[in-house]
């Protein structure tokens, strides 16, 4: 299979970026999207050109590192999968494919397709455990760059466990306030987060988070008063 790629190239965070055309030739249909980019990078190395920078680790859909926007969709077309689980057979021979990094104010570009998602890690540090893979697709898809689905998944995960009850209120307050202080946007119920989540986490968890946070905030205010 052959493809025309429009890849976002940006040499460093402070530099301007642009889309650059590349040809991906003789790509096996069974290749994953990242394997296709590996093949392209090998050809760039052969020509002594800078390879395309991107993040990846497990390549099994559990680490969340492969944070790409493909044809305008975080992680690419299809449901319940990460970029490394997207296969080239899902495209048509000769397709033009647009590839760019996650677009969110909280995820500054480091270089090319690699972004800094460390703010999600800093939210995780405000709690005791993590449930979702923390890929950040929900933030990248949200028009407001909200991390509400991510936070809701974490708070609900522990709030539903018996051993999570003692710190249920303080956990909700601490995580939401940490999220706000780091510059993530507000949730306005677009549901784009739910649509692109590779773990298919439901947006109904956001309602649960709102209830927990509201109750905890009221208790906190009465206690302080």
Image (spheres, rainbow, N blue to C red):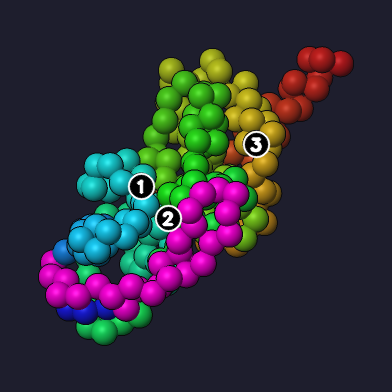
* Label drawn at residue 55: 1
Residue 90 in the image: state x and y as whole percent.
24, 73
The quarter in which the N terminus is drawn is bottom left
User: Does residue 38 lie above or below 55 as drawn?
Assistant: below
What segment is highlighted magenta in the picture? Answer: 4-30
- Around disc 1, counting alpha carbons within 10 Å, would you say few (fewer than 14), some (14 to 19), or many (20 or more)? some
| Disc marking residue 113 | 2
Q: Residue at x 44, y 33 (%)?
A: 157
Q: Which residue is mark 3?
A: 182
**Magenta segment includes 10:** yes
Would you say residue 37 sits in the magenta stretch? no
SS class, disc 2: loop
| Label located before the other in sequence (2 or 1) | 1
Q: Position of residue 44 (x, y in %)?
A: 27, 62
Circle nearer the viewer, 3 or 2: 2
Query: Tag 1, which secondary structure?
Result: loop
């Amino acid at each position: 299979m052959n493809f025309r790629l429009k890849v976002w190239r940006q040499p460093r965070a402070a530099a301007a970026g642009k889309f650059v055309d590349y040809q991906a030739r003789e790509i096996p249909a069974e290749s994953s999207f990242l394997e296709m980019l590996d093949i392209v990078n090998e050809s760039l190395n052969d020509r002594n050109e800078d390879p395309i920078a991107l993040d990846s680790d497990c390549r099994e859909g559990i680490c969340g590192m492969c944070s790409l926007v493909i044809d305008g969709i975080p992680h690419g077309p299809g449901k319940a999968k990460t970029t490394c689980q997207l296969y080239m057979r899902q495209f048509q021979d000769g397709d033009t494919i647009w590839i760019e990094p996650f677009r969110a104010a909280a995820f500054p570009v480091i270089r090319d397709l690699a972004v800094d998602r460390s703010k999600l890690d800093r939210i995780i540090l405000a709690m005791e455990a993590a449930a979702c893979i923390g890929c950040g697709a929900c933030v990248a898809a949200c028009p407001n760059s909200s991390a509400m689905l991510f936070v809701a998944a974490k708070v609900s995960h522990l709030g539903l466990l018996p051993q999570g009850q003692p710190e249920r209120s303080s956990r909700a307050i601490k995580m939401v306030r940490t999220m706000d202080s780091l510059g993530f946007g507000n949730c306005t119920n677009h549901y784009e987060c739910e649509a692109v989540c590779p773990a298919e986490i439901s947006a109904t968890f956001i309602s649960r988070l709102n209830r927990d946070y509201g109750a905890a905030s009221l208790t906190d205010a009465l206690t302080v008063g």
